[in-house]
């Protein structure tokens, strides 16, 4: 399950083997979600359910990926196409952080199913969920955005490839757009959001905030006829909300702003350490492969600029010194030193926020990048400039 690119948002239909009525599903070759997630917190015969589901799907000309969303190790089935290998990081019960995973590890490994290491983060949606009852854990407080974001950052550092923000089955309140946006700015992995989403507008709001995949379960169980309405809204999303007439945005520009905001979060890390607030991220194939912020004071090293830190991290990620397929995002125009390093790394695209007419590369070395490299300037320019200006004002 790759991280969808902008305008390529996904919709997953969640089916609980104990409750779902397959005969009521209005799935056809022209009306279908992108994924079907199968699972629940309690039980059901997963294998038999998937076999029945496959029979149902034979009427379509479109192969729908069936992805396991298991509540415990007993719900594994080799009949699926893939599995979200879940770890409940929002809870403190080791049985659901690693215990059930160990019990199912051999079966998952031997099945050769595609698997996605996924952090499951339960957020209070206003009701007691079956996940809470089964695991004996409490959800995270939606007002405590810092803890939620820190949990998701920890998940990415642990190597998780996806984060599932879940308000819970039958949630009264879905995961807020503020939470989704804060998590999206902090991590680069696939972001899945589910629970309490009942309208196409709520789905689009989640997409706008940064969700890559929206999951809907209970609502479609109760109102299967509304699937087509949601799919129509999803198809029109990239045309009307993001890149439609009058939006003032292109898909590329919107993607640039997304990654520049992550670079700004790196700049704020520098600011918290009393460093000049400049941040940088390097992206390849819709994944952040390196990130960094200014550390010249912390390391007592004049070369420890944000771009240098990010290039080093990206090279370590890929295991090579050249980054020809990468885009570098930095909050301020690179200096000649950093521009030289960018050129030597053969980075093919450079995007920066605020110009630096006094120390920027354009003043001293305008041809230093790789000859085929392209440059985009002024992305979130005002925000990037204001951060620098406020820093130096405080110094006076």
Image: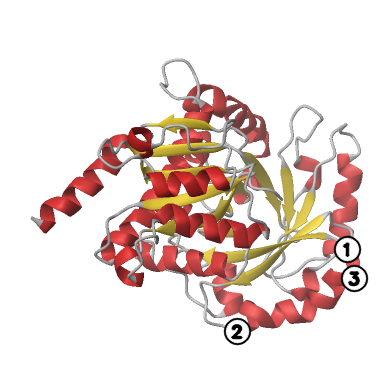
Instruction: Using a 10 Å C-alpha cutoff, classify the residue at mark 2 as few (fewer than 14 neighbours), some (14 to 19) or many (20 or more).
Output: few
Residue sitting nearer the eye, 176 or 291? 291
Picture quadrant where residue 48 is located:
bottom right
Q: Are marks 1 and 2 in contact (CB under 8 Å)?
A: no
Left or right, 66 with reference to 42: right
Picture quadrant where residue 38 is located:
bottom right
**Going 61% across and 48% down the picture, which residue do you hit?**
215
Instruction: Using a 10 Å C-alpha cutoff, classify the residue at mark 1 as few (fewer than 14 neighbours), some (14 to 19) or many (20 or more).
Output: few
Residue linked to disc 3: 110
Left or right, 116 with reference to 369: right
Could you tell me how far apart the alpha carbons at marks 1 and 2 are, in whole angstroms?
A: 26 Å
Label 2 or label 3, whichever lies nearer to me, is 3
Q: Which mark is residue 112?
A: 1
Instruction: Using a 10 Å C-alpha cutoff, classify the residue at mark 3 as few (fewer than 14 neighbours), some (14 to 19) or many (20 or more).
Output: few
Counting from the top left corner in percent of width and height, residue 220 is at 64, 43
Residue linked to disc 2: 94
Q: Are marks 1 and 3 in contact (CB under 8 Å)?
A: yes
Under circle 2, the secondary element is helix
> How many marks can you see?
3
Under circle 3, the secondary element is helix
Could you tell me how far apart the alpha carbons at marks 1 and 3 are, in whole angstroms?
A: 6 Å
Asked if one can make out residue 162 in the rendered structure from this viewpoint, the answer is no
Counting from the top left corner in percent of width and height, residue 190 is at 60, 52
Label 1 or label 2, whichever lies nearer to me, is 1
Counting from the top left corner in percent of width and height, residue 333 is at 36, 40
């Amino acid at each position: 399950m790759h991280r969808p690119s902008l305008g390529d948002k996904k919709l997953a239909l969640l089916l609980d083997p104990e409750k779902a009525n397959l005969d009521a599903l209005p799935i056809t070759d022209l009306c279908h979600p992108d994924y079907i997630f199968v699972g629940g917190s309690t039980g059901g015969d997963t294998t038999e359910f998937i076999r029945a589901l496959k029979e149902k799907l034979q009427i379509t000309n479109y192969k729908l990926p069936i992805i396991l969303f298991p509540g415990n190790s007993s719900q594994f089935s080799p009949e699926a196409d893939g599995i979200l290998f879940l770890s409940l990081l929002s809870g403190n019960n080791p049985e659901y952080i690693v215990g059930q995973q160990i019990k199912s590890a051999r079966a998952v490994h031997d099945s050769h199913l595609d698997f996605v290491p996924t952090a499951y983060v339960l957020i209070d949606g206003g009701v007691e969920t079956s996940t809470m009852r089964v695991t004996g854990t409490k959800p995270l407080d939606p007002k405590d955005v810092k803890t939620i974001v820190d949990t998701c950052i920890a998940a990415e550092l642990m190597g998780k490839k996806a984060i599932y923000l879940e308000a819970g089955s039958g949630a009264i309140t879905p995961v807020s757009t503020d939470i989704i946006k804060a998590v999206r700015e902090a991590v680069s992995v696939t972001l899945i959001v589910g629970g309490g989403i009942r309208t196409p507008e709520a789905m689009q709001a989640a997409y706008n905030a940064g969700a890559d995949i929206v999951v809907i379960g209970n609502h479609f169980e109760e109102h299967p006829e509304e699937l087509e309405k949601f799919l129509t809204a999803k198809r029109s999303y990239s045309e009307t909300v993001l890149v439609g007439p009058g939006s003032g945005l292109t898909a590329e520009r919107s993607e640039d702003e997304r990654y520049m905001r992550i670079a700004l979060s790196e700049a704020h890390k520098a600011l918290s350490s009393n460093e000049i607030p400049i941040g940088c991220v390097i992206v390849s194939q819709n994944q952040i492969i390196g990130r960094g912020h200014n550390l010249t004071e912390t390391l007592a090293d004049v070369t420890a600029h944000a771009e240098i830190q990010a290039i080093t991290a990206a090279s370590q990620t890929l295991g090579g010194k050249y980054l020809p397929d990468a885009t570098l995002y930095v909050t301020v125009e690179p200096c000649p030193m950093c521009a030289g390093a960018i050129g030597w790394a053969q980075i093919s695209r450079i995007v920066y926020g605020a110009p630096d007419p006094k120390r920027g590369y354009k003043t001293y070395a305008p041809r230093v990048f790789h000859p085929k490299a392209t440059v985009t300037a002024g992305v979130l320019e005002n925000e990037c400039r204001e951060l620098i200006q406020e820093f130096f004002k405080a110094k006076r």
